[in-house]
Image (cartoon, coloured by chain):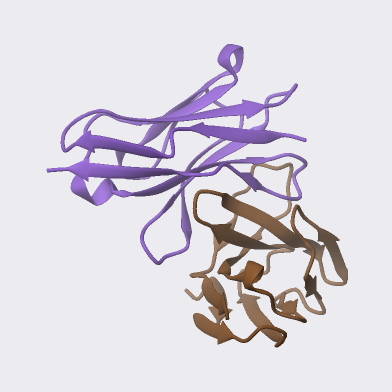
Chain colours: A brown, B purple
């Protein structure tokens, strides 16, 4: 039961470096999400996708990019890392529906930008 | 846009005491509401969800939540806290069926 898998689990980046956070799910879910979690702030939606080839911005998209070439994968790209992007990142997936379907989460990627 | 507000960033209870975690939603129509739990260094796990089938929703680990339209609330309760309930709890809403928005979270501490 893999579910939603995120890699890497931890990463330290220098300011200005770029990286891709990987996310893959094996539940054939159409919907996928990226969130960031900061202390006391809950989870903020960065980007989401309702299917392959379709992505949309969430609450805090600046500094990030995504792509969705397959149903399974939804990578998150940081082009020029900044200290403000130090956070824990969660990927999630869900079945489409009328809104009553829950999201399934990965274990998270802890990113530090120094 | 629909959102949720969790009252109290930290709640501390004694083992065996009632757990009450508060969540209010802003919506003109009854939304789809969820409670998630996050244990240290882990992802989020669904506790329960409200989908309009019943106002009292039972979840895992003895938790339940009651949807009250008149109060726009969806508070999470558990009659008797266990040490293993110590975690962070998030209330969430799906505004459009596409995305999911979370509250700021409530950290529950259980004292022996």
| Left or right of residue B44: residue A113 | right
Residue B61 shows up from this direction: yes
Figure quadrant of residue B29 = top right
Classify the position of the C terminus of chain A by image quarter: bottom right
Q: Hey, which residue is sitting farthest top in the picture?
A: B70
Q: Position of residue B7 (x, y in %)?
A: 48, 30
Residue A8 shows up from this direction: no
Q: Position of residue B18 (x, y in %)?
A: 25, 28
Figure quadrant of residue A19 = bottom right
Q: Hey, which residue is sitting farthest left in the picture?
A: B112
* Viewer-closest of B84 and B66: B84
Looking at the image, is A51 positioned above or below residue B75?
below
Tell me what residue is drawn at x 60 percent, y 16 percent. B69
Tell me what residue is drawn at x 80 percent, y 73 percent. A65
* Viewer-closest of A19 and A76: A19
* Viewer-closest of B14 and A112: A112
Tell me what residue is drawn at x 56 percent, y 67 percent. A87
Q: Position of residue A9 (x, y in %)?
A: 49, 80
- Count the marks: how many? 0
Tell me what residue is drawn at x 63 percent, y 76 percent. A23
Q: Position of residue B71 (x, y in %)?
A: 57, 15
């Amino acid at each position: 039961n893999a579910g939603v898998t995120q890699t890497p689990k931890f990463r330290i980046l220098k300011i200005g470096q770029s990286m891709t956070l990987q996310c893959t799910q094996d539940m054939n879910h159409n919907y996928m999400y990226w969130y960031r979690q900061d202390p006391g702030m809950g989870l903020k939606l960065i980007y989401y996708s309702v299917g392959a080839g379709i992505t949309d911005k969430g609450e805090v998209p600046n500094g990030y990019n995504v792509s969705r070439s397959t149903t399974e994968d939804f990578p998150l790209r940081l082009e020029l890392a900044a200290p403000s992007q130090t956070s824990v990142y969660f990927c999630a997936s869900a079945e489409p529906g009328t809104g009553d379907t829950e999201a399934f989460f990965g274990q998270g990627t802890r990113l530090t930008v120094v | 846009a629909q959102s949720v507000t969790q009252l109290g960033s930290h709640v501390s209870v004694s083992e065996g005491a009632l757990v009450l975690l508060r969540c209010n939603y802003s919506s003109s129509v009854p939304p789809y509401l969820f409670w998630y739990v996050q244990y240290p260094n882990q992802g989020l796990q669904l506790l329960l969800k409200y989908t309009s089938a019943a106002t009292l929703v039972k979840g895992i680990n003895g938790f339940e939540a009651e949807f009250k339209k008149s109060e726009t609330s969806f508070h999470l309760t558990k009659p008797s806290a266990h040490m293993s309930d110590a975690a962070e709890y998030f209330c969430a809403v799906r505004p459009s069926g596409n995305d999911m928005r979370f509250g700021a979270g409530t950290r529950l501490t259980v004292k022996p």
